[in-house]
Image (tube, rainbow, N blue to C red):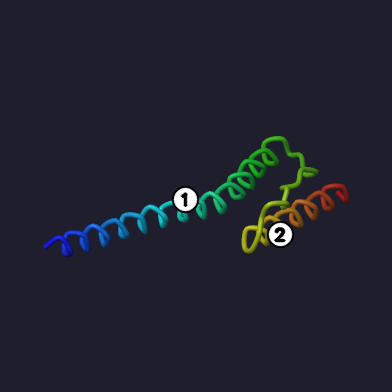
Amino acid sequence: ENAITLQHRIIFGSLGLSVAIAALIAQFTSRAIALPLQSLTQLTQRITQEQNFSLQVPADNTRGEVKSLTDSFNQLINRVSQLLTEV
């Protein structure tokens, strides 16, 4: 009976620890994605409000699709700036 109780404690303890670790990883991952997107959104709003097309989104801490989006956005802003100076 003590062995079964110990077995249940180990199983439930491991399960609880696994859930806690998964939650921490999920939080870290979501922040890693959300913070650069928030920065991009804020800068987009600022560019629109100020009509300042010389601003760029820093891409230093981004990777993967977020970096690709940031680079594409910066290229778009550069192209808009060039077109506005040609007009």
54 vs 5, left or right, is right
Disc 2 marks a residue whose amino acid type is Ser
Residue 30 or residue 55, whichever sits in front:
30
Seen as rendered, the residue at the extreme right is 86
Residue 35 or residue 25, whichever sits in front:
25
Residue sitting at 61 percent across and 45 percent down? 41
Quadrant of image for the N terminus: bottom left
**Residue 36 x/y as whole percent:** 62, 49
Q: Nearer the viewer, mark 2 or mark 1?
A: 1
Residue sitting at 65 percent across and 44 percent down? 44
78 vs 32, left or right, is right
In this rendering, the answer to whether 47 lies above or below 26 is: above
Q: Which residue is mark 1?
A: 27
Disc 1 marks a residue whose amino acid type is Gln
Q: Which residue is mark 2?
A: 72
Disc with the residue nearer the chain's start (2 vs 1): 1
Kind of element beneath mark 2: helix
Residue sitting at 62 percent across and 63 percent down? 65
Residue sitting at 82 percent across and 53 percent down? 83
Is disc 2 in contact with disc 1, using a CB cutoff of under 8 Å? no
Seen as rendered, the residue at the extreme top is 50
Label disc, if present, on residue 69 of the rendered structure: none
Seen as rendered, the residue at the extreme front is 2
* Circle 1 crowding by C-alpha within 10 Å: few under 14, some 14–19, many from 20: few
